[in-house]
Amino acid sequence: MPWLEIIISSLLGLAIGGVAGFLIRVSVVEKGFQTAKNKAKDIIDDANTQAEKIKKEKLLEARQEIYNLNSENDKLIKEKRSIVTELEHRVNQREELIERRSANLDKRELNLDRKEEILDDKKNALEEKNSKLESIIQEQNTKLLEIANFTEEQAKTVIMKRVEEDMAQEIDRFLRDREEDARQEAQKVAKEIITQAIQKYAQDVTAESTVSVVTLPNDEMKGRIIGREGRNIRTIEALTGVDLIIDDTPEAVVLSGFDPIRREIAKKSVETLILDGRIHPARIEEIVEKTRVEVDQFIRNMGDKAVFETGVGRMHPDLVKLIGRLHYRTSYGQNALQHSIETAFLAGKMAVELGENEVIAKRAGLLHDIGKAVDHEMEGSHVDIGVQLANKYHESKPVIDAISSHHGDTDAKTIIGVLVAAADALSAARPGARSESLENYIKRLTQLEEISHSVAGVEQAYAIQAGREVRVIVKPNEIDDAKTYLVAREIKQKIEDTLSYPGTIKVTVIRETRAQDIAK
């Protein structure tokens, strides 16, 4: 049947188409699966490749890190090994040192053992000797007591006396050695400072007499100076306060007065009157007044010159005038102003050497004798007067201390005071600075010898070198070598307490033992 065939054919066609479609679909699916499988394989291959690459990279990094760690470990190991080696070397050195010390200690122990044995032997020997000596001394003491008929107390007294004498000698020797050491050191330093100060300053000091002499052109001038009935000479003496001595001395008039300034005014006035030729009371009064003004101005100029020359700074005008007055003041023939200037320079140079204030030292040196300018007008010593003047014009404490202590009346409280005292002694004690009268000179020499003879044990004493040294010869049977220093010290102390003298006096004690015999 055609319709059934159509249906069957259609069904067959559908079945075939379905199978074919299924087959095609299966083929397509299989093809897609294969493609996907291939892609998955490619992905897996790529992943394996990447993994292998990453693995290799990580392996390389791990190997590099392992290499680096190994290098660091090797470096650390080397450092540790070097440290260990160094420590081993030090340990070995210490061990060697310990072995050496041990060997030395062993040697010392052996030596000490030997010395101990020697000391024990010596100790035993000394003990034996001491026991023998004690027995001998005991026997001698017994014999001495029997011979001298001394009691034990008397014997102890004699022994103690001997011990005291021995100890006195030992103490004296010790003091002498220490004193000599201190003296040498002090002299060394002082000589250096003083020598440098003296080398840096040199100044002539003039010596002036206590009277003034006016030279006359002829002897007829003496009568004119005396005047009718002596009116001229009386006028001069009344106006100047100076005595005119007109004697047989040819062509000379002597002016004598206690005040050197008055004497200078009188001298200049007389010289001016002689040159002028008009000598009568009215003219004398005029010349004396004019001369007094000139001398006063000269005194101020001398004070200003001294202040400027020493460089001590500003000073009260009245004090400057007092300094100028020192030009007419003398001490043992030494000009007081020149002495003060010299003391100022010496004190200043020594102050520089010691690091002290040079200006204050100079000022104190210049003013240390300022009291001498008016000591004939005021009561008290020139030291007390100088302190009063310094306080009056408000000088500094070091200056006042130097004035009050430069003669040892008080102890110096400042270094400046000590330096001024030393400079004052240097200026006064150097050769040619001062002069003394023959009577005072002989009297001082006699007193030196008498003081030396007053000390027990002195046999002879001689003052030499113009009284700057005294040589003392002691009795050798009474004074031993150790006691000569005690004798010298005692004489020195008596001289300082008794005499007043410029400079220093050296005491030399001589002890000599002579043995004589005659060959026949």
Image: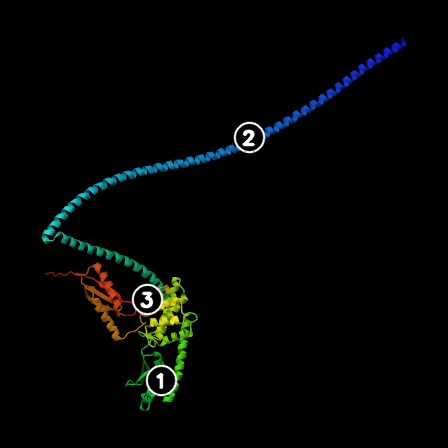
Q: Where on the picture, by quarter, is residue 457?
A: bottom left
Q: Position of residue 302 (x, y in %)?
A: 40, 75
Q: Is residue 441 visible?
A: yes
Tell me how many marks there are.
Answer: 3
Task: Name the residue at 39% across, 86% down.
Answer: 286
Q: Where on the picture, by quarter, is residue 346?
A: bottom left
First reached walking from the N terminus: tag 1 or tag 2? 2
Query: Closer to the observer: label 2 or label 3?
Result: 3
Task: Name the residue at 38% across, 62% down.
Answer: 354
The colour scheme used to paint the residues is rainbow
Q: Secondary structure at mark 1?
A: helix
Q: Position of residue 283 (x, y in %)?
A: 38, 88
- Position of the N terminus by quadrant: top right
Q: Which residue is mark 2?
A: 66
Q: Position of residue 218 (x, y in %)?
A: 32, 87
Q: Reply above or below: 26 against 183.
A: above
Query: CA–CA distance between discs 1 and 2?
Result: 129 Å
Query: CA–CA distance between discs 2 and 3?
Result: 97 Å
Q: Amino acid at mark 1?
A: Leu
Number of residues whose C-alpha sits closer than 10 Å to that of mark 3, classed few (under 14), some (14–19) or many (20 or more): few
Q: Where on the picture, by quarter, is residue 220?
A: bottom left
Q: Reply above or below: 119 against 215.
A: above
For residue 305, side relative to residue 463 (left or right) = right
Question: What mark, if any, has residue 410 been given in the picture?
Answer: 3
Number of residues whose C-alpha sits closer than 10 Å to that of mark 1, classed few (under 14), some (14–19) or many (20 or more): some
Query: Closer to the observer: label 3 or label 1?
Result: 3
Task: Name the residue at 40% across, 81% down.
Answer: 294
Q: Position of residue 32 (x, y in %)?
A: 75, 21
Q: Which residue is mark 1?
A: 239
Query: CA–CA distance between discs 3 and 1?
Result: 41 Å
Q: Is residue 279 visible?
A: no
